[in-house]
Image (tube, rainbow, N blue to C red):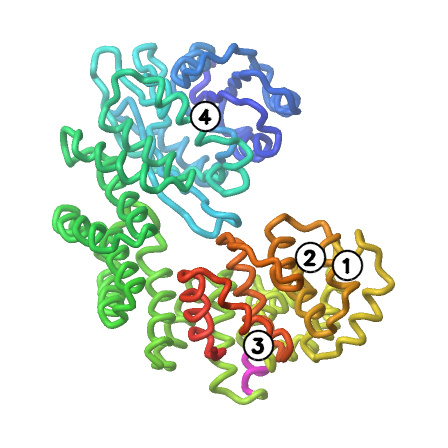
Amino acid sequence: MKPFLSLCMIVKNEEKVLRRCLESVIGIVDEIIIIDTGSTDGTKEIANEFTSLVFDYKWEDDFSKGRNHAASKATGEWILVLDADEFVERESFKNFKNELKENLIDKNILAVKILNFLGIDGKETLLNYHERIYMNNGKIKYHRTIHEMLKHNDSLEKVGIANLQVYHSGYMTAEKREKNKSQRNLKLLNKKTHKEAIDYYFLGNEYSALGELSKAIDFYKKGYQLKNSITYEWVPKLLVRLIFCLHAEKRYTEALDIIIPSEEVFIELVDFKYLKGKIYQSQRKNKEAIKVFETILSQKDKLKTDSSIDYLEYLPHKHLGELYEKEKLYQDAVHHYSKTLSVNDSDDYTWTRLINLLAKHSSKEQLVEFLYKNILIKNKMSHTRLIKVLLNVPNNEVLKLINLFYKELDIPVIEKESLKLKMHLIGGQYSEIIEIINLKSVSELSRILHTDIFSIIDFIILTIEQNEEKYRTLLLNLNTDKSIKKLINTLFFNKSKKLSLIEESLFIGIYKRAIVVEAEKSTVLMKLKKEILSLDGKKELKRELREYDLGL
């Protein structure tokens, strides 16, 4: 019997993610074709576990050629295209295949919803649609060397939306950096001699990913100017990303000038409303921001999102919690933080904000009861995770509560040792820390600090409090990056140099921690040394200290 659904992939050095992808589809697709473009890791070995249809292919800097070569090997009635860093939920994928097989469909190309996980830990998401399923009739092929698109030879594309969601992890920070995707994509995009409007959108995306926001803004603007129609699917995405870049560059007026007309054109999209609220929040126009986010929540059932489902409920509640807290409307803040966690109880930042707020306005007994009854009963909240949440609460009395959960921990020995050092720091028991550290080699201490429980910040505070030269020297000998060594020289050896953004962030972290753990010498030193911060650094320090009522 002729296969019904063929999976076609092109891969290179994807051993970390390929198995996850193939395990999500094996036994559901009828055929798997994998084109390898020169892997030097275990990619081909993994591919061969799932299919005998693995082929070598000489890469020609052209994604469409690679996609079309894979399709030429397929014998199914329909072709599904996935990348190695994507996967599907098996049950929904089975249902989709059955629907495709049993129902008469008047489309020959289907777009799927792709949920992209962003950032370091993938807690942020971005939605987009992409044409990934098409009839294997020999007339539909990919074109464009990069950001490839399907096209019917006779211009008879009939495009629909598939009832299928694909998950994509390739935009998570670590993976994207490892693959150097942006540099590769820029090379291919810049090779195009005749660029279309959409190419400038893609160029903007790559420069944005590289942090070159001014270039990204220029390319987004050019893409928008050259568009033939506002109805293209990529146009609102371009506008949203342009606004993001303008926001990041603090060009708030320009961003609002784009948002206002975009709201009128894309009236059902929540994206522009959400971004308007974020800009008001950045401008400290708290009342205006509150009004926007409250309006989104009241209309969430009528609105749609083009970028992230989080814009409809989760993030508006989260920002309202922050805004009401700044306005000292604590009951409203607690309400919205609680609503945030009812939508996403894996948000440790919001748990930290909520616990910090409750600690200020509740007794110790009430807080402990809350921790046991409202947090530990959550399915995802282990004792270990709760302790990590509590460690981020800038309140020394809250930090001392960690002792209540210490015995329940099931963590590696090195993490327990690191936590023990942390608890001594919180209690001001410096001699106990020194007793443990003096028995450690440089490499052992470095491993403890890398747990980020008793961290480099904590060790710097210990060094200031003890005023021991051997610890200052030890700090320089630890396996730390140059920015930390430069800051250590500035703090302890008066080698004053202009600090980078990373160094200023670390300086602020030390200042805040010193206040929280009531380290007097460290607090005094950081207060004296704050003049080395840039103007922006001083503003950020002031903002963070004010935000947590830590004083100046």
Classify 101 as above or below 325: above
What residue sits right under mark 2 in the picture? 451
Residue 56, image x, y percentages: 56, 11
- State left or right for residue 163 relative to residue 302: right
Residue 74 in sight here: no
Q: Nearer the viewer, mark 3 or mark 4?
A: 3
What residue sits right under mark 3 in the picture? 515
Crowding at label 1, few (<14), some or many (≥20) Cα neighbours within 10 Å?
some
Q: In which quarter of the image is residue 468?
A: bottom right
Please tell me which residue lies in front, 540 or 350: 540
What residue sits right under mark 1 in the picture? 414
Q: Distance between the residues labelled 2 and 3?
A: 22 Å
Secondary structure found at label 3 = helix
* Labels 3 & 4 near each other (Cβ < 8 A): no
Residue 115, image x, y percentages: 40, 42
Residue 11, image x, y percentages: 53, 22
Classify 451 as above or below 482: below
Q: Residue at x 41, y 42 (%)?
A: 211
Please tell me which residue lies in front, 484 or 97: 484
Magenta-colored span: 366-372
Please tell me which residue lies in front, 278 or 86: 278
* Labels 2 & 1 near each other (Cβ < 8 A): yes
Q: Closer to the N terminus: mark 3 or mark 4? A: 4
On whether residue 469 falls in the magenta region, the answer is no
- State left or right for residue 380 relative to residue 469: left
Q: Closer to the N terminus: mark 1 or mark 3? A: 1
For the stretch drawn in magenta, the main secondary structure is: helix
What residue sits right under mark 4 in the picture? 184
